[in-house]
Amino acid sequence: MQRSSPGIFKSLLATLFATVVLLSASQSFAEQVLRVSAIPDESPTELQRKFKPLGEYLEKKLGMKVEFTPVTDYAASVEGLVNNKLDMVWFGGFTFIQAKVRSNNQVIPLVQREEDEKFKSVFITTRSDITSLQDLKGKTFSFGSESSTSGHLMPRSYLLAANINPENDMKRIAFSGAHDATVAAVAGGKVDAGALNISVWEKLLSQGKVDPAVVHVFYTTPGYYDYNWTVRADMDPALREKLTNAFLALDAKNPQDKEILDLQRTARFIPTKAENYNAIETAARSAGLLK
């Protein structure tokens, strides 16, 4: 019986080892997951509904699983990205700045909706005697979440610019936690007035979930930069480029793309950069909200 030479045996072992490594690498790649979340400025079911078609689209474009995980509050979305538990998050301008500061500039905003270049907040009420910001003195008022750009930071900034200090000049202030909750608080008479982002307000109007004869807008802010999709700076540059290109490729003329864009309440996504949010950071520091 002829014995195998040591050289052949070593060669077989090397081939076997290489095969195992390749199989493991392939399995690892196949199991790659892009972990995505968003600030909870609307109900978890609404956020899931909005993201589902977008997630399926990104899976096809990236060739990897895309998993949406809702978070309990705004702070959790920031900590999730900074602590490597999430890969991409839909931030408001203020939460992006919080993540930027917490991570020591180790986050990168990829894209924003076209509307986010000049986003706005609206102040709403059911009362006929509130027609301007000055009329809020002595009244009860609701912001959204404390970390919300359009539901707290920017409305507060414009109140301060009008020489109205919410804590000193209003009878009572509350934080509803979300834009739709602010509308419910105002409509239900829990507060005299409130502030929320214009996009959610217009959505609720179009869906008939708010009666404009009962609840009306009495002040709309000037425009400011707001929402964006942000990733960590340590994300593979090739994946970051694929993600960016996938968002930019969405075309409203394509029916499937239009469904995605409509749910995101935009006609298209455009590139963005960290410098666009410098005014948000300045406003946050001026209002004493950036820790």
Image (tube, rainbow, N blue to C red):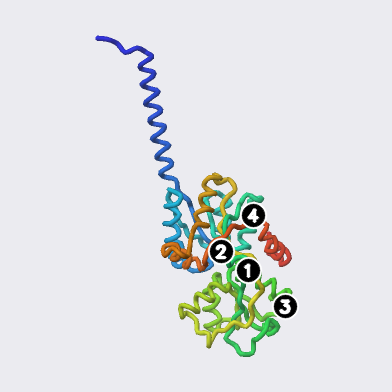
Q: Quadrant of residue 288?
A: bottom right
Tell me the element at label 3: loop
Mark 3 or mark 2, which is nearer to you? 2
Using the numbered discs, state the Cα–Cα distance from disc 3 to disc 4 in whole angstroms.
Answer: 29 Å
In the rendered view of the protein, which quadrant contains the C terminus?
Answer: bottom right
Q: Are dots 3 and 1 in contact, CB under 8 Å?
A: no
Q: Identify which residue, 28 or 57, lies in the foreground.
A: 57
Using the numbered discs, state the Cα–Cα distance from disc 2 to disc 1 in whole angstroms.
Answer: 10 Å
Residue on which disc 2 sits? 113
Q: Quadrant of residue 18?
A: top left
Residue at screen point 49% across, 77% down = 204
Q: Earlier in the sequence, mark 3 or mark 1?
A: 1
Q: Are dots 4 and 2 in contact, CB under 8 Å?
A: no
Residue at screen point 50% across, 74% down = 203
Q: Earlier in the sequence, mark 3 or mark 2?
A: 2
Mark 3 or mark 4, which is nearer to you? 4
In the rendered view of the protein, which quadrant contains the N terminus?
Answer: top left
Q: Earlier in the sequence, mark 1 or mark 4?
A: 4
**Residue furthest bottom in the image:** 128
Residue 263, x across and y down, in percent: 47, 67
Tell me the element at label 1: helix
Residue on which disc 3 sits? 164
Residue 135 visible from this viewpoint: yes
Characterize the local packing of mark 1: few (<14), some (14-19) or many (20 or more) Cα atoms within 10 angstroms: few
Residue 100, label in figure: 4
Residue on which disc 1 sits? 118
Mark 1 or mark 4, which is nearer to you? 1
Q: Are dots 3 and 4 in contact, CB under 8 Å?
A: no
